Image (cartoon, helix red, strand yellow):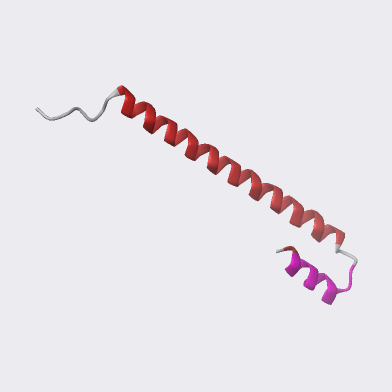
Amino acid sequence: MGKKLSTPEAHSVLEAAQKHHARGLQEQAQALCHLVTYKKLRAEELEETHSFRRNALIKEIY
């Protein structure tokens, strides 16, 4: 018979890779949340600014 591919070592390597990938996705999601919060706070600061200036600053925020 051929070599067994589903060894405990192979599973642990795969599990480590999946955990690493999940941590990366969580970090990206957290960074996006921070950016969205920043955008919201900056947009609130611009509420009373002239519309042309406000639109230019909103483009800058993005």
Asked whether 58 or 1 is in front, the reply is 1
Q: Residue furthest bottom?
A: 52
Asked whether 7 or 30 is in front, the reply is 7
Q: Residue at x 64, y 50 (%)?
A: 32
Q: Is residue 42 above or below residue 30?
A: below
Q: Residue furthest top?
A: 8
The percent coordinates of residue 5 (x first, y second) are 23, 30
Q: Is residue 39 above or below residue 1?
A: below
Asked whether 11 or 62 is in front, the reply is 11
19 to the left or right of 3: right
Q: Residue at x 27, y 25 (%)?
A: 7
Bounds of the magenta span? 49-60
Task: Inspect the magenta stretch and tell me whether residue 38 lies in it.
Answer: no
56 to the left or right of 15: right
53 to the left or right of 4: right
Q: Residue at x 44, y 31 (%)?
A: 16
The percent coordinates of residue 46 (x first, y second) are 85, 63
The percent coordinates of residue 49 (x first, y second) are 89, 69
Which image quarter is the N terminus in? top left
Which image quarter is the C terminus in? bottom right
